[in-house]
Image (tube, rainbow, N blue to C red):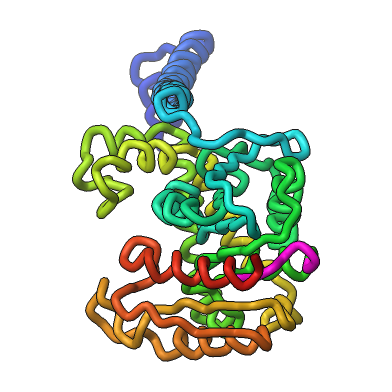
């Protein structure tokens, strides 16, 4: 109203009216200036979005390229490792997959078959196999995905692993009688095998074997879950070449085989760097978590009836850590003696969990005793 009054006063004072078209042009210019400003603001925002999109796309592209290069580096590294470190045994076809089996010795009694611990392969038992081969046929093998064996594309139960061993031995014409040696996690597989194929088993040696009462308490299951998660992370690091790169660039920090003798380091490192190794190790922990509730009580994996059994366990103090052995672990070892009516307990006083390294003679003598009785 004030602007209109001023316009009228100006008209009255000068005696002239402002043309309508001039007012219209001025209004249009003001409107256009406003629209231009809004357009410029929108254009600026769009430019920021476009630049942001390019930055994100560039980062994704670089990450994808790095992942592809890392995966290629891993594949080429695995091929070179397997070419440099040939399997000492033979690769046997088992249901379309190859499992590595190594046997040596020509004893006339039962064959000895060693089942390694969780995530472990046959290389950890090379010394024991050579010692046992002086009086018996001694065999060790790599479970699916471990050592030189092909991976399996799906999860496996304990019975699946026992059946894999049975198929492997059948293909190698090793149908029994057998003396089975199970270390740690391998003790469950040995017991599953004995439950499924009792007529083939002549004797058992359990070395620091896992036991239901210890494994399936809350702490044991939590530990299994933590190991599974760690192995899955390591699997992805291996798949993308990061684990291999770390070992190459920072060998002291990323050393996966600390304490292994120099003559075995390269081979064990090569097998550890396989992607399939960590998938298999994670799946072995998953198998524990999937054990039915009814099989989690002591002895539920199956008793051994009158099959000769020797249980080898560490003493009351672990010399590798200089600390007392967990009472729960020792109690589990004593419960294992109740699996057979013909059980014997042998204590490896100078050993921790890896008795095959610290006191191999204890294991060899236990195997020899079983072999002589069943010969």
| Residue 346 to residue 257: above or below | below
| Residue 18 to residue 92: above or below | above
Q: Which of 199 and 67 is in front in this view?
A: 199
Residue 34 in view: no
175 left or right, relative to 273? right
167 left or right, relative to 80? right
Is 334 inside the magenta-drawn segment?
A: no
Range of magenta residues: 198-204
| Residue 125 to residue 363: above or below | above
Q: Residue 237 appears at what percent x and percent y?
A: 42, 41
Q: Residue 113 appears at what percent x and percent y?
A: 60, 56
Q: Which of 128 and 56 is in front in this view?
A: 128
Q: Residue 145 appears at what percent x and percent y?
A: 58, 43
343 left or right, relative to 322? right
Q: Residue 47 appears at what percent x and percent y?
A: 41, 21
Q: Which of 24 and 343 is in front in this view?
A: 343
């Amino acid at each position: 109203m004030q602007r209109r009054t001023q316009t009228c006063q100006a008209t009255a004072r000068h005696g002239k009216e402002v043309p309508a078209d001039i007012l219209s042009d001025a209004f249009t210019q003001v409107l256009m200036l406003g629209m231009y400003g809004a357009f410029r603001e929108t254009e600026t925002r769009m430019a920021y979005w476009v630049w942001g999109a390019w930055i994100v796309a560039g980062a994704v592209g670089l990450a994808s390229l790095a992942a592809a290069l890392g995966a290629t580096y891993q594949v080429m590294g695995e091929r070179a490792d397997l070419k440099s470190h040939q399997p000492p045994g033979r690769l046997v076809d088992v249901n379309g997959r190859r499992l590595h089996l190594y046997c040596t010795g020509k004893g006339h009694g039962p064959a000895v078959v060693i089942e390694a611990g969780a995530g472990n392969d046959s290389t950890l038992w090379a010394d024991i196999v050579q010692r046992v081969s002086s009086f018996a046929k001694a065999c060790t093998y790599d479970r699916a995905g471990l050592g030189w064996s092909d991976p399996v594309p799906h999860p496996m139960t304990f019975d699946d692993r026992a059946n894999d061993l049975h198929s492997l031995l059948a293909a190698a014409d090793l149908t029994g009688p057998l003396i089975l040696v199970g270390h740690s996690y391998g003790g469950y597989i040995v017991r599953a095998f004995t439950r499924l194929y009792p007529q083939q088993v002549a004797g058992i040696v359990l070395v620091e074997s896992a036991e239901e009462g210890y494994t399936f308490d809350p702490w044991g299951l939590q530990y299994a879950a933590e190991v599974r998660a760690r192995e899955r992370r390591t699997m992805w690091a291996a798949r993308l070449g990061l684990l291999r790169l770390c070992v190459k660039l920072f060998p002291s920090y990323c050393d996966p085989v600390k304490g292994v003798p120099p003559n075995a380091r390269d081979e064990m490192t090569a097998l550890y760097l396989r992607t399939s190794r960590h998938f298999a190790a994670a799946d072995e922990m998953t198998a524990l978590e999937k054990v039915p509730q009814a099989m989690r009580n002591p002895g539920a994996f199956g008793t051994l009836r009158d099959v000769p059994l020797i249980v080898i366990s560490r003493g009351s103090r672990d010399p590798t850590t200089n600390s007392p052995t967990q009472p729960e672990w020792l109690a589990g070892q004593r419960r294992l003696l109740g699996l057979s009516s013909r059980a014997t307990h042998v204590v490896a006083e100078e050993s921790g969990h890896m008795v095959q390294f610290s006191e191999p003679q204890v294991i060899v003598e236990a195997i020899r005793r079983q072999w002589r009785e069943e010969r």
